[in-house]
Image (cartoon, grey):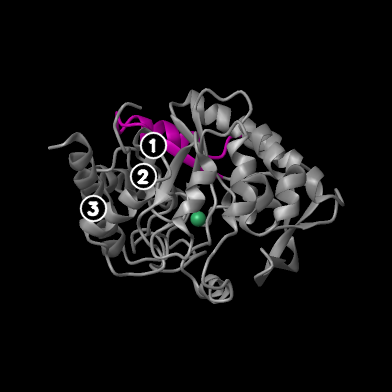
Amino acid sequence: MSTLLPTSIVGSLPKPSWLAEPETLWSPWKLEGAELDEGRRDALHLAAAEQALAGLDIISDGEQTRQHFVTTFIEHLSGVDFSRRETVRIRNRYDASVPTVSGPVGREHSVFVDDAVALRAQTDRPLKWALPGPMTMIDTLYDAHYGSREQLAREFAGILNQEARELEAAGVDIIQFDEPAFNVFFDDVRDWGVEVLERAAEGLRAETVVHICYGYGIKANTDWKATLGSQWRQYEETFPLLRASSIDTVSLESRGSRVPMELVELLRGKKVMLGAIDVADSRIETPQEVADTLREALAFVDADRLCPSTNCGMAPLARTVAQGKMRALAAGTALLRAELSGD
Ligand SMILES: [Zn+2]
């Protein structure tokens, strides 16, 4: 797209309180049946309108129709038994009871395409759609069928590619794969992770993004971050591999994190979606603070390759806070655009 510094959120937004319990991950729905379908669709339209009102250039679904960014996609697949649960350690960080892969995985129908068609009808702005990445998907499951993380990830990559192609056909301009697992399993990322991700994105005309972050601002993640020391250099492992990959854009966390900004240099030539909004802090950034973060990045990424964004999803935040942060993102980006054009 031609807009300089195109803005977007990474993924989720808080859901309205009539649809799900606010400020909670995996919050159960408050509606059922046809009312739930209508409620989710209404929330999708509201989320898009709020992004447009805040002045964002690229519109996302805000994940209003999904309970969780990984689980909801998997729920629609065959071969995964949700009644058979095992406790596994997710991203080497916290234990969770997860469903079991009990047979060959498959996708018999599209998951998000109807939502994408509805959103496409609402706005002329570019649409970005987030899907879970293959490595992050396998990390939320117990595998009793394939016996190989890589093989299961390859199966999911094929399924994700089918979904991405249908989203593209529905008018989605940018497909994003969320791979927080890339910040943990460095050997797997090098050995097969990037290649499998490329398989998920194979043949797409839509722009492709990989989002790698330090997670939502929930306690398990903030406790983990406290152990990472004064400089978070995890991206150093993955960025050179992604720079050499066919993925167009890399989405990373910056504002309020301990990621040294010079690591962005490792992506030179790629588009960089830079998190200028901290999702682990309810304080709303000032436009000046947003501009400061983005300006600092310009030492390592060309202006025409920089895409201002949030650090991660905002689902656990209060709705008014998320709305304020979106406005700050747009206003801070406008400040920097004016500087760059010499106004
Ligand atoms: Zn994230």
Residue 305 lies left or right of residue 190; in this view the side is: left
Residue 240 lies left or right of residue 341; in this view the side is: right
Nearest the viewer among 135 and 275 is 275
Q: Position of residue 227 (x, y in %)?
A: 58, 76
Kindly tell me whether residue 210 is visible in this rendering. Answer: no
Residue tagged 2: 298
Residue at the (42%, 60%) spot, across then down: 315
Give the residue type at disc 3. Arg
Q: Choose mark 2 or mark 3, whichever is in front.
A: 2
Q: Secondary structure at mark 2?
A: loop
Provide the residue span drawn in magenta. 108-131
Q: Which badge, 1 or 3, comes first in the chain's sequence?
A: 1
Give the residue type at disc 1. Asp
Give the residue type at disc 2. Leu
Q: Residues within 10 Å of mark 3 (few under 14, many from 20)?
A: many
Q: Which badge, 2 or 3, comes first in the chain's sequence?
A: 2
Q: Choose mark 1 or mark 3, whichever is in front.
A: 1
Residue tagged 1: 302
Q: CA distance from mark 1 to mark 2?
A: 6 Å
Kindly tell me whether residue 302 is visible in this rendering. Answer: yes
Q: Position of residue 279 (x, y in %)?
A: 40, 63
Nearest the viewer among 34 and 177 is 177
Q: Which mark is residue 327?
A: 3
Tell me whether circle 1 and circle 3 mark residues in contact (CB < 8 Å).
no
Tell me whether circle 1 and circle 2 mark residues in contact (CB < 8 Å).
yes
Residue 155 lies left or right of residue 117; in this view the side is: right
Assign the C terminus to one quadrant of the image: top left
Q: CA distance from mark 2 to mark 3?
A: 21 Å
Q: Residues within 10 Å of mark 2 (few under 14, many from 20)?
A: some
Q: Position of residue 77 (x, y in %)?
A: 67, 44
Quarter residue 285 falls in: bottom left
